[in-house]
Amino acid sequence: MPTKKRPGRKSQKPPPQRRPTAKTRSGAGRAARVTPSGPLQYKVVELSTVDEGSLERTLNEWAAQGWNLDGIQFAMRESSKRPAMAFVLFTRQGSPARHDEDAARGRLMRMSETGSPTAALAAEYTREHVAWAAPMISPLSAHERLARLAGLDEPEPREEGLTLEPEE
């Protein structure tokens, strides 16, 4: 059974006006903030524990310092619906912070001469636990070690430099 075709709208009649609904977007009544053009600074804060408290503390802390929330990215685990990590992105007006390259080179030179603090801690840990962590290496040869395991008091001396004559 064919359906009836709806009559087309007459060109003289304008479309009906829509009334505003009660469901409006949050913040729709506020005026948009216009920021002057210029360089932006970006700040990325990594959260390894993602919960309401850590997100709230991070947002309040950085907003108090003049940063504006730009977005939040969540890193998900395949086995869970909860995010494993979150990256909170902030921006603010101003030129980016200048890095002192000479100071950075100086720190790298000191670290190469003295070692990093992490390497120093690892070396200290190794010195403390070397007695039980690494077995004592025996200065015996494999042949001497086998002779001791077999119960022989003294291993047979190794014959070096002897030449055997063929038997006739």
Image (cartoon, rainbow, N blue to C red):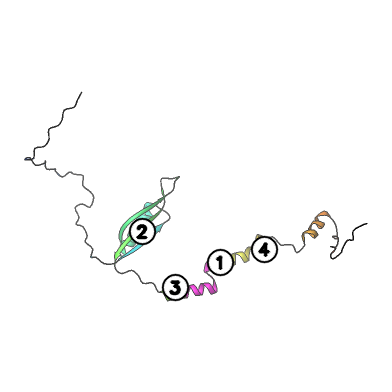
Q: Secondary structure at mark 2?
A: helix
Please tell me which of labels 1 and 3 falls first in the chain. Answer: 3
Give me the C-alpha separation between circle 1 and circle 4.
17 Å
Amino acid of disc 3: Ala
Give me the C-alpha separation between circle 4 and circle 3.
38 Å
Q: Which mark is residue 121?
A: 1
Is the residue marked by circle 1 packed among few (<14), some (14-19), or many (20+) residues within 10 Å? few
In magenta segment, residue 69:
no
Please tell me which of labels 1 and 4 falls first in the chain. Answer: 1
Quarter the N terminus occupies: top left
Q: Secondary structure at mark 1?
A: helix
Per the image, the residue denoted by label 3 is 104
Is the residue marked by circle 3 packed among few (<14), some (14-19), or many (20+) residues within 10 Å? few
Per the image, the residue denoted by label 2 is 58
Against 54, is 116 above or below? below
Please tell me which of labels 4 and 3 falls first in the chain. Answer: 3
Amino acid of disc 4: Ala
Against 118, is 51 above or below? above
Q: Nearer the viewer, mark 3 or mark 2?
A: 3
Q: Residues in magenta?
A: 106-118
Q: Nearer the viewer, residue 63 or 74?
A: 74
